[in-house]
Image (cartoon, grey):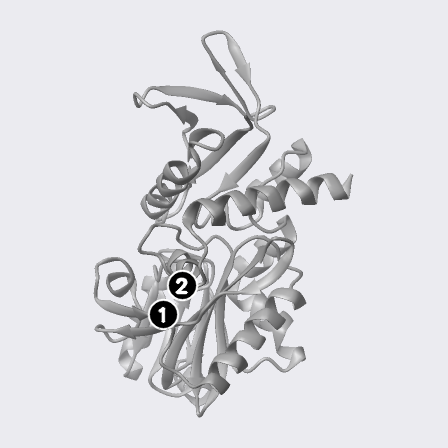
């Protein structure tokens, strides 16, 4: 049986969410391979065995020694949300070691983790999106210029963060500086965007059995002011799959999500968020290591498409291993 490392944890505020995702993957695939839970933190990389005993990872070749036996891995299932698993660092590391990993390649990860850069790359292709302005730590804050460009209300976001950490919806001019400060706690770069009123949906695109596949669309109905951390992880939202939109709307947003996946030369899992503003789907952002718990959006969409968790996860391992073989 193959040795599969399930990478979880990470260095960002999303580490606990990643641990949840990783443990779901572990339970789903452990009967079909030798699955190893690898916890990744700034101060240690360790394999955590069934008795919760920690075994240090050799960073030189990403191996672990257990009872004097060295174990190397055939593939890494990357469930790290945020840095360093979703922003290109681990992708580059595994590429140098020639170890297959399940998320997208290094460049795609680095690009899509940077919301501002992703928007800049997609804008020339005519992808509808919000009006935006950028702020970097240390810049002077011109609140009048911000309002003139994006209007009120607007969203102020940490540029390189996920799970709605560092995001605020701003209604008044006097709230802008504080919202920027909140974003700066997560990242030194800030994205400020106009508010788009409309139905919010999430669309996952995966490579399944060698085909780029769009999963059923999910409609997001938040009980909070927007789809923030509490709405995502504390039950304060409805995630309705399939979305209560027309067939034409479903086709339009599905085609747009697939176009973005292919324009960015993606692989593995992706989940893109859109808002139907004035009837047109507007792109918000793309996640390349989306949540994978039973209650997360992508697994629910896969289930609606008739794909169980084991098949979903084992397929992405197979796809990752094929891609490395084909590139050699």
Q: Position of residue 260 (x, y in %)?
A: 60, 70
Q: Residue at x 45, y 63 (%)?
A: 305
Quadrant in the picture for the C terminus: top right
Marks 1, 2: nearer the viewer: 2
Query: In this rendering, does residue 115 appear at all?
Result: yes
Q: Residue drawn 49% across and 65% down?
A: 215
Q: Residues within 10 Å of mark 1 (few under 14, many from 20)?
A: some
Residues at discs 1 and 2 in contact (Cβ within 8 Å):
yes
Nearer to me, 236 or 323: 323
Is residue 132 visible in the rendered image? The answer is no
Residue of label 2: 304
In the picture provided, is 232 more to the left or to the right than 328?
A: left
- The residue that appears at 42% across and 51% down in the rendered structure is 308
**Marks 1/2: CA–CA distance:** 7 Å
Residue 164 lies left or right of residue 90; in this view the side is left
How packed mark 2 is, by other alpha carbons closer than 10 Å (few <14, some 14-19, many 20 or more), is some
Rendering coords of residue 72 (x, y %)? 57, 22
Q: Secondary structure at mark 2?
A: helix
On screen, residue 235 versus residue 73, left or right, reads left
Q: Which residue lies most toward the top here? A: 68
Pick out the residue farthest to the bottom.
Answer: 278
Instruction: Answer above or below: position of 78 versus 127.
Output: above
Viewer-closest of 175 and 271 = 271
Counting from the top left corner in percent of width and height, residue 58 is at 53, 21
**Residue 241: which numbered mark, if any?**
1
Q: Earlier in the sequence, mark 1 or mark 2?
A: 1
Quadrant occupied by the N terminus = top right
Q: Position of residue 253 (x, y in %)?
A: 51, 78
Secondary structure of the residue carrying numbered label 1: loop
Residue 69, numbered label: none
Q: Residue at x 46, y 36 (%)?
A: 6
């Amino acid at each position: 049986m193959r040795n599969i490392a399930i990478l979880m944890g990470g260095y960002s505020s999303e580490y606990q969410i990643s641990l949840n995702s990783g443990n779901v993957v572990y339970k789903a695939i452990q009967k079909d391979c030798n699955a190893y839970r690898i916890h990744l933190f700034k101060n240690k990389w360790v394999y955590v065995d069934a008795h919760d005993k920690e075994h240090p990872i050799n960073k030189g070749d990403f191996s672990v020694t257990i009872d004097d036996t060295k174990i190397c891995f055939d593939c890494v299932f990357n469930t790290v949300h945020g840095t360093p698993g979703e922003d290109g660092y681990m992708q580059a590391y595994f590429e140098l070691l020639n170890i297959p990993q399940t998320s997208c390649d290094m460049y795609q990860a680095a690009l899509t983790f940077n919301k501002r850069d992703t928007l800049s790359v997609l804008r020339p292709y005519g992808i509808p999106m919000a009006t935006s302005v950028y702020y970097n730590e240390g810049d002077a804050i011109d609140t009048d210029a911000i309002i003139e460009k994006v209007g009120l209300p607007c969203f102020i976001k940490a540029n390189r963060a996920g799970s709605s950490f560092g995001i605020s919806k701003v209604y008044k001019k006097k709230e802008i500086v504080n919202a920027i400060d909140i974003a700066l706690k997560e990242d030194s770069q800030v994205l400020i965007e106009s508010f788009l009123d409309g139905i919010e949906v999430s669309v996952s695109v995966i490579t399944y059995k060698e085909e780029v596949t769009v999963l059923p669309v999910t409609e997001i109905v938040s009980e909070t002011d927007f789809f923030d951390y509490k709405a995502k992880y504390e039950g304060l939202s409805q995630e309705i799959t399939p979305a209560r939109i027309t067939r034409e709307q479903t086709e339009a947003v599905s085609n747009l999500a697939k176009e973005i996946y292919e324009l960015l030369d993606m692989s593995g899992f992706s989940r893109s968020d859109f808002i139907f503003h004035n009837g047109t789907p507007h792109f918000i952002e793309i996640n390349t290591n989306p949540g994978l718990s039973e209650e997360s959006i992508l697994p629910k969409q896969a289930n609606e498409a008739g794909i169980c968790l084991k098949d979903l996860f084992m397929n992405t391992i197979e796809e990752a291993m094929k891609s490395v073989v084909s590139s050699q």
